[in-house]
Image: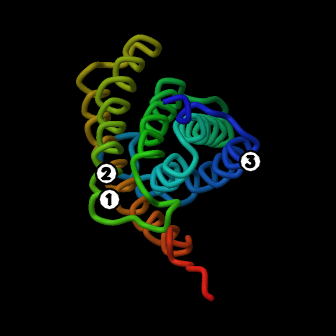
Amino acid sequence: MKDYFKVTTKTIVATGLGAAIFTLLFMYVKVPSPIPETSFQTAYGLSAFFATLFGPIAGGLIAFIGHALSDAVQYGSPWWSWVIASGVASFVYGFAYKRTKVEEGEFKIKDIVSFNVIQVIGNAVAWIAVAPVLDIVIYKEPANLVFTQGVVAAMMNSISAGVIGTLLLIAYAATRMKKGSLSKSS
């Protein structure tokens, strides 16, 4: 379990790069939904990809920092309830880190299912529980609005992480050398 929370130079570099890309995707590559202040965000596919490769700490920080920077640049200050929820969702995505064989060059059906179960759980916790509750506690938002936004965000972010994250992980696994693919010749 401690491998999930190990911070290395690689983790720090991945976090910085991931947060920068997340910020740009979050600001510029999104599709608005009919529910106020919610969009289909491609950035969650990216954070799911990074979290699966580098673990929960990198995943959580990538989304937290990226969302906070995006809000600060676009709106003047972060909307903390959703920034925290982004971090929570991507932190949970990171539990796919040791549950897939992507680094071994395999991302088969079992890995895809495992990854997607984890990311759906992360999105449900973050957007149906954390974001709405913090919206009510911090900003005194109306419950019916924030829970509607949360359910829509959970569905859209699950699709983003599921489709984009899965495709990125399949592509990445294809670039990795499979274990045992090299044999010693005489």
Mark 1 lies on residue: 112
**Image spot of residue 175 (x, y percent):** 55, 74
Based on the displayed image, in which of its 4 quarters is residue 122 positioned?
Answer: top left
Question: Is the residue marked by circle 1 packed among few (<14), some (14-19), or many (20+) residues within 10 Å?
Answer: many
Element class at badge 2: helix
Q: Name the side, left or right, on which 99 lies relative to 117.
A: right
Q: Amino acid at mark 1?
A: Ile
Give above or below for 2 relative to 152.
above
> Observer-nearest residue: 134 or 177?
177
The residue shown at (27%, 64%) is 109
Report how far apart the C-alphas of labels 1 and 3 lie in the structure. Answer: 26 Å
Determine which of the numbered discs, if any, sits on residue 13 in the image: 3
Mark 2 lies on residue: 116
The residue shown at (29%, 35%) is 124
Q: Amino acid at mark 3?
A: Val
**Image spot of residue 184 (x, y percent):** 60, 80
Look at the image and tell me in which quarter the C terminus lies.
bottom right
Q: How is the image coloured?
A: rainbow
